[in-house]
Structure formats: C-alpha cells, structure tokens
Image: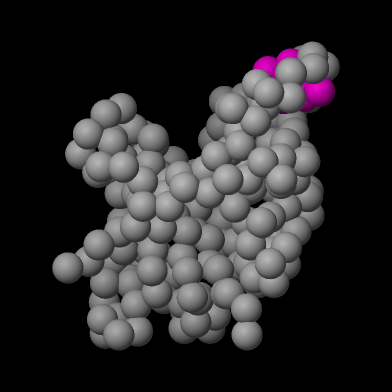
Amino acid sequence: MGKRILVVLPHPDDEAFGISGTLAKEIAGGAHVTYACLTLGEMGRNMGVPPFATRVTLPAIRKLELEESCREIGIQDLRMLGFHDKTIEFEDRKKLDGSIHELVNEIDPTLILTFYPGYSVHPDHDATGEAVVRVVGSLPAHKRPPVQCVAFAKNHEEELGHPDVVNDVQDYLTHKMASIRAHRSQFQAAELLGNKKMPDKAIRERFGTERFWTYRFD
C-alpha cells in the first residue's frame, strides 16, 4: 500500500503555500491524501479585489475555493469539520481532539501534516497543531505516525533548528500555483492571480521548496 497522508489545517488556503507542492508530489507517487480542514475561514477579512464576496457569502465562496484547490493538487478526500474560524483555541477540547482522533483511527495515516504548535503565527494554526500533537501523543509510542509540521514564526529556526524535511517541488509548481490561485478571495497579488507574469526563476526560488519540522514526542 502507498502512503496514507492526513493533513489537518484550520483554514481554506492553509494548504496552498506551504504544502501543496509536497502533496501533489506524494499523490503522483501513489499516496492517498485526506485533508481535514477545520473551518471555512468565514471570519477572513479579504473579500477579493475588487470585492466580490460579502460577510454573508464568504463561507460558501471559500468552500468552493477550497474544493478547487484540492482538485488542482489532486487530493482525493476532503473533510470539512465545521469548527468556527478564529476560535479553535476556545473549542471544546474533547470535541476537537475527538474529531481528529476519529480520523486517525479511520485512516491509520503513515504521515500527518499540520502546523508546528507555537511557531505558526495565527492562534488557529497553533491550536490546530496542539490538538494534533495531543491526539498523536495519546497513542502508544509504537502506533504514532510521524507528524511533520509547517513553521514560519519569526526566529523559528533559531529555536527549532534546521528543517528535518526539505522537499524540492519544482516539478509540481503547476499544481501549487493553481492551488494558490484557486483562493481568489484571499490572495490579490497580481503575480498570483496571473495578471502579471513572474519570471520562472523567481517562481522556482519563491515557491519551489517546502520545509517541515518533525514533532518529537520524547
């Protein structure tokens, strides 16, 4: 059997910049990916440029954007868990952890991807990573899948050290850029929307590498 990858992130678009190339690469190699997105990002401030979303329509729009992004990456299994945007740290821990635990039991992942707790800038990011770590840490040591984390807080390398995994995803930039562009309501940079051509070298340098830190439980 190929790899079974479980991705646990809080918002639509969290997958786009940090892991979409890695996922496309793994899927091309035979991996099956389940992406558990905790919220619909309904509290996001961006409404498109020029604005085409409203506070009322944004959740539905972001759901469609997420589905498009997953298609571009090749993700086979998207789960939307229905938690509330910007409140993950305040969610009932039993409910939050229980939903992740159910997925782990169902999928029996060989790898989990999430955010590194404390090093991911947004409270929802950190709280999601913390929940994943709690769930996996509660398993017997021999049953714990590796947890690889995205980190990008200021000075994170000074405290975490160099990344344990550095993936060259240059061959999968078509998938990655399509994933980013799918989230039209959130990303307005002209080069991301296709309105201004970035040189290929600049695209490779900016987006061609994805880095992960392995969470160590012991």
Q: Residue at x 33, y 72 (%)?
A: 136
Question: Is residue 211 left or right of 198 when viewed as pictured?
Answer: left
On the image, the x and y values in percent for residue 63 come to: 71, 48
Position of 67 relative to 75 (above/below) = above
Residues 141 and 208: in front is: 208
On the image, the x and y values in percent for residue 104 come to: 46, 77
On the image, the x and y values in percent for residue 155 come to: 27, 29
Q: How many marks?
A: 0
Q: Residue at x 17, y 68 (%)?
A: 218
**Based on the displayed image, in which of its 4 quarters is residue 48 positioned?**
top right
Q: Is residue 147 visible?
A: yes
Question: Seen from this angle, which residue lies furthest left?
Answer: 218
Q: What secondary structure predominates along the stretch shown in magenta?
A: helix
Which stretch is magenta?
Answer: 189-194
Q: Residue at x 61, y 37 (%)?
A: 208
Position of 85 relative to 218 (above/below) = above
